[in-house]
């Protein structure tokens, strides 16, 4: 499934005016107690809220903070007057960390690791008319020029996510006779889709969502666990940045699921979008195409870095094709050479089936866009 929300969402130049239809859904926190009766809310000139009870008593209400966990990547609901926990997910925050590193001795610096998604790399390649390999090498050179220590490609972690999705589907298929919640299995690397499922369908859909982490969060685990041990560092000493095509990835990185209480650090500390990389290049006065190339980094010290690769399938990661091919071979011994899509209501809602002797063995669907996803899960 593709992202539900626009990758063009901008969080700059916020307007303090909120239209009635855009009013924030949680402007205050009210303690609900049984038998408390009806109360009115009074707003002072300074914007503070007071609860006025029927007997005339007043109580000042605490302003609720809006975090990325609360936001569904909508536009218009957050103004600069709100206390918004969004500054940790910006290229300005990356600049602060890089600037702080320059003020201390090398052994006191945080190790800055940047992981670049293939989708962002492809966008940059088109923008600067470069091939994927040159783009990856020049990006490595740029990030190291401004202070990063390592630059990785998330194709490595996407392999993990795809492989685990394949294995999970086969396990669910074999367990479907014993569990009504085994199938269908819903796969997606889009955090907007996960937010939608959690907030609108809850327990109905959640058991059917694949438990495999997205490539971003797999990379987060690898960097903060495996790589930190290689570097003889605790996870909190590594500042991990990912370059992603969509603002929804900022929401994903901020989820409490991916926060280590032991080390008080997130798997991914900061997410910057492809557009923010453009801003960094502009602020540095650098054209990517004019930079000298730098060697690619490898997550495993014993393995040399490989050239950037792509996957078969859709732009969202190719989950359907990979899971379909693996399941056909593993469950039925059928080698699928070409996956044939059949459009349903529109070109963004398509199905794929595996048949043998007129019997449908596997039935998959690919849905892109909010309306198609709603129709699929309804």
Image (tube, rainbow, N blue to C red):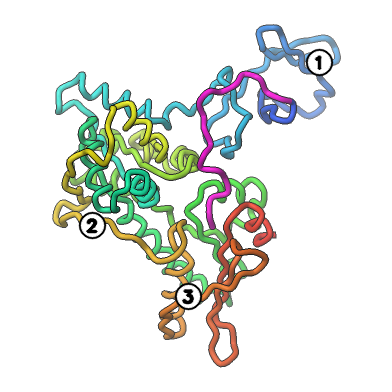
Q: Mark 2: which secondary structure? A: loop
Tags 2 and 1 touching, CB below 8 Å: no
Whole-Å distance between the Cαs marked 2 and 3?
26 Å
Which quarter of the rendered picture does the C terminus lie within? bottom right
**Magenta highlight range:** 1-19
Q: Residue 70's mark?
A: none
Tags 3 and 1 touching, CB below 8 Å: no
Give the x, y percent position of residue 42: 76, 13
| 227 w.r.t. 275: above or below | below
Mark nearer the N terminus (2 vs 3)? 2
Specify few, some or many for label 2: CA neighbours under 10 Å numbering under 14, 14-19, or 20 or more: few
Tags 2 and 3 touching, CB below 8 Å: no
| 357 w.r.t. 377: above or below | below
Where does label 1 land, which residue? Answer: 53
Q: Quadrant of residue 359?
A: bottom right
- Answer left or right for 119 relative to 98: right
Q: Is residue 352 visible?
A: yes
Q: Is residue 314 magenta?
A: no
Q: Quadrant of residue 350?
A: bottom right
Of residues 25 and 356, the one drawn nearer to the viewer in this rendering: 356
Task: Tell me which residue sits at (43%, 80%) in the image.
Answer: 336
Specify few, some or many for label 1: CA neighbours under 10 Å numbering under 14, 14-19, or 20 or more: some
Mark nearer the N terminus (3 vs 1)? 1
Where does label 3 land, which residue? Answer: 339
Q: Mark 3: which secondary structure? A: loop
Whole-Å distance between the Cαs marked 2 and 1?
67 Å
Q: Mark 1: which secondary structure? A: loop
Of residues 292 and 108, the one drawn nearer to the viewer in this rendering: 292
Q: Residue 307's mark?
A: 2
| 61 w.r.t. 159: above or below | above
Whole-Å distance between the Cαs marked 3 and 1?
65 Å
Give the x, y percent position of residue 270: 38, 35
């Amino acid at each position: 499934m593709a992202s539900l929300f626009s990758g063009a969402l901008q969080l700059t130049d916020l307007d303090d005016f909120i239209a009635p239809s855009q009013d924030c859904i949680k402007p205050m926190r009210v303690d609900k107690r049984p038998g408390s009766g009806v109360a009115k809310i009074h707003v002072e000139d300074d914007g503070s809220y007071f609860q006025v009870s029927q007997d005339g008593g007043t109580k000042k209400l605490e302003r609720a903070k809006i975090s990325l966990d609360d936001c569904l990547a909508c536009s218009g609901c957050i103004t600069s007057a709100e206390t918004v926990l969004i500054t940790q997910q910006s290229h300005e925050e990356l600049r602060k960390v890089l600037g702080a590193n320059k003020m201390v001795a090398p052994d006191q610096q945080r190790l800055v690791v940047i992981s670049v998604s293939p989708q962002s790399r492809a966008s940059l390649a088109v923008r600067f008319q470069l091939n994927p390999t040159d783009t990856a090498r020049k990006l490595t050179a740029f990030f190291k020029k401004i202070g990063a220590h390592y630059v990785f490609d998330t194709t490595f972690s996407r392999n993990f996510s795809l492989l685990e999705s394949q294995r999970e589907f086969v396990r669910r298929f074999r367990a479907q006779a014993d569990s009504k919640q085994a199938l269908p299995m819903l796969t997606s690397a889009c955090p907007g889709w996960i937010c939608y499922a959690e907030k609108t369908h809850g327990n109905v859909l959640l058991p059917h969502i694949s438990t495999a982490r997205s490539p971003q969060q797999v990379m987060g685990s690898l960097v903060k666990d495996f790589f930190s041990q290689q570097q003889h560092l605790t996870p909190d000493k590594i500042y991990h940045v990912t370059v992603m095509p969509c603002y929804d990835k900022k929401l994903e990185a901020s989820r409490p699921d991916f926060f280590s209480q032991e080390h008080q650090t997130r798997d991914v500390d900061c997410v910057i979008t492809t557009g923010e990389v453009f801003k960094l290049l502009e602020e540095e006065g650098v054209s990517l195409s004019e930079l000298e190339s730098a060697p690619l980094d490898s997550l495993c010290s014993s393995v040399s870095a490989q050239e950037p690769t792509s996957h078969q399938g859709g732009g969202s990661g190719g989950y359907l094709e990979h899971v379909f091919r693996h399941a056909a071979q593993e469950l039925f011994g059928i080698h699928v050479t070409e996956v044939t899509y059949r459009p349903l209501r529109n070109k963004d809602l398509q199905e794929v089936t595996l048949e043998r002797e007129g019997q449908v063995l596997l039935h998959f669907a690919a849905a892109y866009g909010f309306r198609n996803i709603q129709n699929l899960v309804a």
